[in-house]
Image (cartoon, helix red, strand yellow):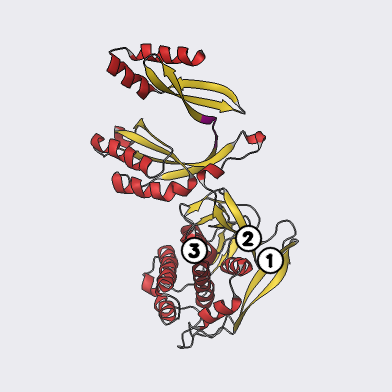
Amino acid sequence: MLYLDCFSGASGDMILGALIDLGLPVDALNGALGSLAIEYGDITAERVSRAGVSATKFHVHGRDAAVSDGAHKHHHLKHIVAAIRRSALKPESQEKAVALFERLAGAEAAIHNTPIEKVHLHEVGALDSIIDIVGAVYGFDWFGIDDVASSPLNVGGGMVRCAHGDFPVPAPATARLLKDVPIYGRGTSELVTPTGALLVTGYARSFGPLPAMRLEKIGYGAGDRDPKDTPNVLRILKGERAAHDETRDASPDVGGAERIVKIESEIDDMSPQFFGPLMDSLLAAGALDVFYTPVQMKKGRPGTLVTILAPPARRQALTDVLFRDSTTIGVRYVEMSRTCLDRAVETVETPYGPVRFKIARRDGEELNAAPEFDDCARIAAERGLSIKEVQTAAITSRRR
């Protein structure tokens, strides 16, 4: 997986710098960008220091050059799409780049109340957009990693100069692209650009704290400024998500905590007959627990709160099941920590037959022990006894 750590914001050149720092070859990137037939001069990557942190700074030389078809710096969407379509990028990478530009143009069209086909990309400039976005698309494709997550984005603070005047941070296009994404403001300058917002939200499947992972490599991409208090870098962590049984934290301070995700959705328009199969499907897809809570919803309608607890890596699969097998049109989720006792199953011989016990321990000390209800119910039915009698016999047998 790749984890985008946006503690100091995000921009297109920071993302490209971090990808190069991770191992993306500059020559290969230059070849991919050259196939766009855009006269931008050259690209380079150099080592720089940002508040004492060594990082890679991505540069594009000749950013004000015109596209070879004679269009000006700020292009309509059709000019950008044409440049992407004639490139040597893989077809799926072309589609991804086009989709990103269409989303960017759609954001600006909504802000200016302008048809999308007439939008100029004022906030970033067409040449900057093509180099940064297409370069990042090529970079993510080069690594071949679909599992991308991100931290909440630090958008900064203060005011920013846009094509139509000064606006508070985040800029209008940036704010629209960050809709439904966790953000916060710390600092006195713009830290997330529209291109940065577009790329992070275009690739990250989830947003939250760093998930449990086996870390392999770290890349740092530098921004233009070099403030003294905080490194102006975007950090990408590359590694492998830890398996569920590897997510326990051995530190005694956190009591053996592990990361889980809670997924929730309220439903008020589904037949009760569907809730049973829905729970079965969610458990089969990897949920640790599923439970339903009655709630009162808008317009006084009774509804059901669906709550799912799962390993973070199963969030997308469980969300797909929820959309497929229920009538919900949206879900929310949050990652959290939980602490569990060590659990084991032991079998005890009773006068009526074997009964399994669920045992819970911590640091070797037994804290809970309970006979398996299904075993007790089965034996009670077979022998014409009450379940309480079988439970009592099982507990007595275990104490001997």
Which quarter of the picture shows residue 120?
A: bottom left
Name the spot of residue 309 as percent of width and height, x first: 44, 39
Name the spot of residue 147 as percent of width and height, x first: 49, 57
Nearer the observer, 233 or 371: 371
- What is the CA distance from the residue labelled 2 to the residue labelled 3? 24 Å
Nearer the observer, 374 or 60: 374
- The numbered mark, 2 or 1, whose residue comes first in the sequence reads 1
Q: Nearer the viewer, mark 2 or mark 3?
A: 2
Q: Is residue 44 left or right of residue 287?
A: right
Q: Amino acid at mark 2?
A: Lys
Q: Is residue 297 left or right of residue 243?
A: left
Q: Amino acid at mark 3?
A: Leu
Residue at 41%, 77% in the rendered image: 81
Looking at the picture, does residue 127 appear above or below residue 305? below
Q: Which mark is residue 289?
A: none
The segment highlighted magenta reads: 338-343
Tags 1 and 3 in contact by the CB under 8 Å rule?
no
Looking at the picture, does residue 211 appear above or below residue 306? below
What residue is pinned by disc 1?
A: 55
- What is the CA distance from the residue labelled 1 to the residue labelled 3? 22 Å
What residue is pinned by disc 2?
A: 217
- The numbered mark, 2 or 3, whose residue comes first in the sequence reads 3
What residue is pinned by disc 3?
A: 198
Name the spot of residue 215 as percent of width and height, x first: 61, 55
